[in-house]
Image (spheres, grey):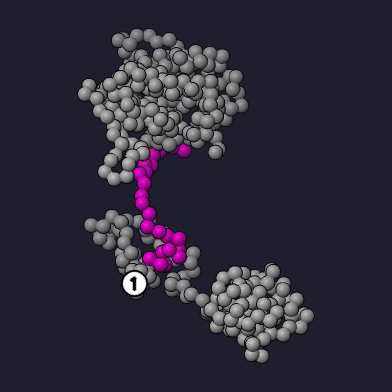
Amino acid sequence: MAKHHKLELSETDHQKLVELRDKGKPAYLRERAAALLKINEGLSPHKVARKALLKERDPDTVYTWLRRYKENGIQGLFQKPGRGRKPAYSAKSPEEAETEVYNTIGQSPEHLNPHQTRWTLRTLGNTIPWLCNVSVPGIHQILSRLGISYKRGRLYIRSPDKDYAEKMDRLQQVLEETHHHPQTFVVLYQDEFAFYRNPTIAKDWARTGTKTPLARQSYKHNETCYGIGALNPHTGDVVYQQVSSCTVETLHSFYTEICQRYASVQRIYLIQDNRAIHFHANLLAALLPQKVSFVKPTPPNWTGKLSKKIGNLQKLPIEIIQLPTYAPWTNPIEKLWRWVRQSVLHLHRHCDDWKTLKNKVITFMSQFIGGSQTLLRYVGLLPN
């Protein structure tokens, strides 16, 4: 090895390089110090570049490290200002550039082109000043460096309820009260769902190619059945009934079953969505005096007077807690409906045996009587 490619170190210099190799910052200094120590041990810079480092390097790179160390010592190993890949954000910092791009893609591009609902790379380049002279592939690279990628969208709904925060605060108060006083108060998430004689279509395993899973339809009328359920968020206990239609009488019957299940408590808080039938005059008259002052949705043809056809209903110790409007994510029992659809109703093979199908749904729900930690975890009320 040529003399100018060797490296002789004093004990002090050797110790400094060892410390730099083990604890040097920035991280690139550790690799450069390791390379110099290998050269000091007798390896050529070429061999160090090809085989002695964690990552193979161009030999000219290691020769440059050696030359700069001989000329300037450890200071020569630091990167000089202005070296490395240049930022493409003009005079902006990466944080400022990222914020500007986020603010842009958060708006609709229709103000630039009325026929365009999504951003393209070229449209972004024409909108953001420091991207105007960058090619389309270059814009793609810049967005990737900023952590912005082209992704598939998802369905989304935002509750328009102006009382959203107040309702959620009231809900949290009830959850805390029932948690601390389980012998006196109970809280339940309540909802209804519908299922049908014919199976719903979903994914299943099948031979690759044109063969697909089949959802066999019945020649009979596609009947509907309604399930009414209530979920205890503290125990996972489920109260469930199946009915042919959801009326004031069937809801009152279900409420009565809830009160029988929790006969020892003084008050049952029922957390519900804003379906109009939940606020029928006859149904509210059969419950405790309601304290919440939020607007109750009612059809225009409802007078608010008791219907003589329904008659007097038994008084029940239930107080309704309203969820925000159009906010299904605030009701965990919605995920229980998803579970029963995935397990029992998708691609089922009982379209010609309506009674068996309904019994299978009842059997599925009965596994949660008395409580279930598995269910609470599935609906998101317990950590995974």
On screen, residue 213 versus residue 178, left or right, reads left
Quadrant assignment, res 245: top left
Quarter the N terminus occupies: bottom right
Vertical side of 35 occupied by 3: above or below: below
Q: Residue 374, position in %: x, y?
A: 52, 30
Q: Residues within 10 Å of mark 1 (few under 14, many from 20)?
A: few
Quadrant assignment, res 335: top left
**Residue carrying label 1:** 135
Vertical side of 222 occupied by 50: above or below: below
How many circles with numbers are drawn on the protein?
Answer: 1
Which residue is rendered at x = 43% and y = 36% of the image?
329
Identify the main secondary structure in magenta.
loop
Magenta region: 140-166
On screen, residue 383 versus residue 206, left or right, reads right
The amino acid sitting under disc 1 is Ser
Which residue is rendered at x = 75% and y = 76% of the image?
15
